[in-house]
Amino acid sequence: MSTRAADLITLGLRIRHFRAERGFTLDQLGERVGMAGSQLSLIENGRRSPKLSTLQDIATAVDVELTDLLKNEAPNTRAALEIELERAQRNPLYGALGLPRVKMTKGMPMAALESLLGLHRELARRASEAIATPEEARRANTELRERMREQDNFMPDIEQLAEDRVRASGHVSGALTHREVSVMAEQLGFNLIYVNDLPGSTRSVTDLVNHRIYLPPASIPGGHGLRSMALQAMGHRLLGHERPSSYAEFLWQRLQINYFAAACLMPQAASVAFLAQAKRERELSVEDFRDAFGVTHEAAALRLTNLATSHLDMPLHFLRVTGDGALQKGYENDDLPLPADVTGSIEGQFVCKQWSARSAFTHTNRTTEFYQYTDTPAGTFWCATQTGATDAGEFSISVGVPFVQAKWFRGRETTQRAVSRCPDESCCRRPASEVSSRWAGRAWPSARLHAHVLSPLPSGTFPGVDDTEVYEFLEAHAAE
Ligand SMILES: [Zn+2]
């Protein structure tokens, strides 16, 4: 609905308010301004736009300044609710339901007004929530990655905020302790409370009234994940987050709190000192960084992407890949050609089979990182990959740099080499023609759907299925 129509509702209610204050009926005021009571009623209901001269007459009659009459705010709380309800009822969202409009009268109980308004607000909230289709979610995700790439994945303001809060907690060096995290919460006016019955869809819940942050109990005593969750919850408060109005804003807030938590667990000054020293000794490794600050391998690898370019003058990439080769998270500012769909989205795309992120699954025993040089159409990259497993399956975490930067890292002397021609499909995406001609039209695989909500289905003969793997599987078993 137009601003003009919205303004007319407010104007009408202001006139009615001042008329009631003076104790005039519609007809009495109408008489004073030379207008029928029924006409005046149309103005008060926001259905007719009055002439300026009429407004001046009304202002004089009810003894207020014209500017008072024209103020664009509700004259009182009830009127504010009436205005909001009237606007909601004129919204196409409500119109589409084909339900009657409720006419607001003086006799309508406040409870009825509030109840109707509550339903309208919920209708609007659900409608805007439904806008986050997987398509839009992917687009928002891509925009965010590009935005962070432009700033080398570095956010100086949050670094400073984290550094200040950590120092205030009394922390000096090494890993941030659970005790220090509690102190940080107390300084913010919150208590950390561990409960068994947190809603399944939440990571933490903050009670803004009683100043409590509810967290799940540690599955492993002293487990590190809790510090991060508590810090993320504090991040929302410290960064002044409001309820996100869009999926893009939701993602942006989540990125910020994750960044804040990481910057607390691995504070900038201490991390840069540690990493710069390792670089001087040509012993850079995610492993050591992880162990020095008591965080997960993934957290340390991601944190390296925040600091490596801004402080160590080094472009790099990060990949989290599942056991079947699908990219779950990725970042690069070193021009590694990440697989992407037509919209630029990388999540759910399969990375080249030759990359360290996938070859590590077959080569390593998980106790140490796997190192590999890979020639790609964009140059040669050196990568260090750590594999692991969760209930959801295997995954690998890789951090890599262009060839010239490999000299700073432990593992640079590896003899492991591979050649990747992706995105050229003949690299690893298309079956050998001989195999293909033997099996095309003679295989019927059934796809295993990716649980990851952002995953688009990769294209193949069968959506969601890698032809090459199916054919190779058939080849191997046909011979038995
Ligand atoms: Zn390939």
Image (tube, grey):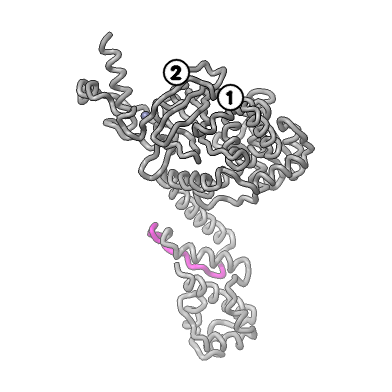
Identify which amino acid the numbered label 2 is placed on: Thr
Mark sitting earlier along the chain (2/1): 2
Task: Note whether ligand 1 is within 8 Å of mark 2.
Answer: no
Name the one closer to the observer, 154 or 274: 274
Where's residue 472, x and y in %? 30, 19
**Is residue 234 located in the magenta-colored stretch of the structure?**
no
One can see residue 97 in this view: yes
In the drawing, what numbered circle is on residue 362?
A: 2
> Left of 207 or right of it: where is 89?
left
Mark 2: which secondary structure? helix
* Magenta part, dominant SS: loop
Q: Tell me where the magenta segment starts and ends, as one range.
A: 95-107
- For this orientation, the residue located farthest to the top is 480
Distance Cα–Cα, label 2 vs label 1: 21 Å
Residue at numbered disc 1: 410
Task: Report x, y in % for residue 384.
Answer: 52, 26
In the image, what residue occupies the spot 50% across and 84% down?
Answer: 37
Assign ligand 1 to one image quadrant: top left
